[in-house]
């Protein structure tokens, strides 16, 4: 049986690894001491928005706090925050055997390139996790929205496909992941808005003013992607270019149309919101910041996404958690655009 390691035992890593482990996979976790202690004491309790649950007792959880254990890995799922990718790359480079497969299940569009540069003797693949995962307590992780895992197609990954299928986490394979990553990033532009709103995702998206903020951020990003010749993949029932228009409809119509497009748990929040609540640095530089960087490469500006980056950075430094109303946040973004 293939040995699978989760490098980055946070919410996403524990959920994916836990589901694979619950289905009989040979899985080990590498994470910080806080999570390691919780998994050793509590095991894993996994749940999903449709009321499905999985339980893994503590004695079945193999967890360590150092990367040296990954010397036995056939497959490594990297699920650390984007800022930690260079450290992950350096640590894994020192222990992984040649031929091991490494999948970046991270936000942003450049993490796999960082890993690939440090791991020339391994197969490094881009992956995408479309759903939201939250930590509900020690060892308890909840999938709050729907979606299927996406990964770049590669022959080296084929021996592991059945393990994901048995865990009811089927992999959708693509030859070119960049359009998929940008499609996911377009949806993730809402992470900053949700974090600043300090509300559950479903409640935030039910209010038109917040949706107009997201529509502005997406339109700006789509215009830049068009200039760059990148066409986002279709990862929802609607093409990416149609979503900004959907966001502008009335609350009543959005409730009807949005329900058909995406299932969201009423209590789910973005990972960026969870990071602000915990006093952690966010991934704003690898989400809205990616749009700002793309604009710079094209000799353009991205004032809407740039302002969201500024507001989240201000929130990271603030002693008090901000809770922006939709109207106030929309006014900030409108003021950021040139006259």
Image: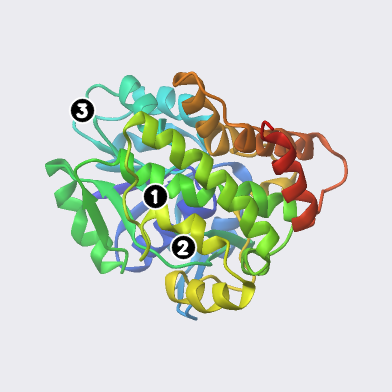
In terms of sequence position, does the residue under pointer 3 or pointer 1 come before the other? 1
Q: For residue 277, say whether it is visible.
A: no
Q: Between marks 3 and 2, how big is the CA–CA gap?
A: 30 Å
Classify the position of the N terminus by image quarter.
bottom left
- Say whether disc 3 or disc 2 marks the residue closer to the N-terminus: 2
Left or right: 298 as drawn, with respect to 173? right
- Badge 1, how many Cα within 10 Å: few under 14, some, many 20+? many
Q: Secondary structure at mark 3?
A: loop
**Residue 34, horizontal then vertical, whole percent:** 64, 47
Give percent across and percent down for residue 178.
32, 38
Q: Which residue is under mark 3?
A: 98
Q: Which residue is mark 2?
A: 59
Mark pair 2, 1: CA separation: 12 Å
- Dot 1: element: strand
Q: Residue furthest left?
A: 155
**Badge 3 density bin: few <14, some 14–19, many ≥20, Cα 10 Å:** few
Query: What number is the disc on residue 207?
Result: none
Rendered image: mark on residue 28:
1
Q: Residue at x 48, y 42 (%)?
A: 8
Q: Nearer the viewer, residue 77 or 63?
A: 77
Left or right: where does residue 99 sit relative to residue 69?
A: left
- Nearer to us: label 3 or label 1: 3
What residue appears at the point 43 percent right and 26 percent down from the top-left corner? 91
């Amino acid at each position: 049986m293939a040995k699978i390691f989760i490098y980055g035992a946070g919410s996403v890593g524990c959920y994916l690894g836990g589901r694979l482990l619950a289905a009989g996979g040979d899985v080990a976790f590498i994470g910080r001491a806080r999570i390691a202690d919780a998994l050793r004491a509590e095991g894993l309790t996994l749940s999903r928005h449709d009321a499905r649950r999985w339980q893994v007792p503590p004695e079945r959880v193999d967890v360590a706090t150092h990367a040296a254990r990954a010397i036995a890995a056939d497959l490594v799922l990297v699920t650390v925050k984007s800022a930690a990718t260079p450290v992950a790359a350096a640590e894994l480079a020192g222990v992984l055997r040649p031929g091991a497969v490494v999948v970046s299940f991270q936000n942003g569009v450049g993490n796999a390139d960082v890993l690939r540069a440090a791991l020339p003797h391994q197969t490094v693949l881009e992956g995408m996790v479309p759903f939201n995962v939250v930590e509900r307590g020690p060892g308890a992780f909840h999938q709050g929205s729907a979606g299927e895992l996406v990964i770049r197609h590669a022959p080296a990954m084929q021996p592991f496909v059945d393990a994901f299928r048995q865990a009811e986490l089927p992999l959708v394979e693509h030859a070119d992941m960049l359009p998929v990553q940008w499609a996911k990033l377009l949806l993730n532009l809402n992470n900053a808005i949700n974090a600043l709103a300090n509300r559950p995702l479903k409640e935030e998206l039910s209010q038109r003013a917040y949706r107009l903020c997201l529509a502005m951020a997406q339109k700006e990003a789509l215009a830049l992607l068009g200039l760059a010749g990148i066409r986002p993949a279709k990862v929802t029932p609607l093409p990416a270019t149609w979503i900004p228009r959907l966001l502008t409809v009335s609350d009543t119509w959005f409730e009807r149309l949005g329900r058909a497009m995406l299932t969201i748990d009423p209590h789910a929040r973005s990972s960026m919101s969870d990071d602000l609540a915990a006093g952690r640095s966010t991934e704003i530089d690898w989400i809205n910041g990616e749009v700002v960087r793309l604009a710079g490469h094209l000799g353009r500006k991205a004032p809407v996404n740039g302002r969201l980056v500024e507001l989240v950075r201000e929130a990271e430094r603030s002693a008090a958690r901000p809770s922006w109303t939709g109207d106030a946040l929309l006014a900030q973004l409108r003021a950021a655009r040139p006259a």
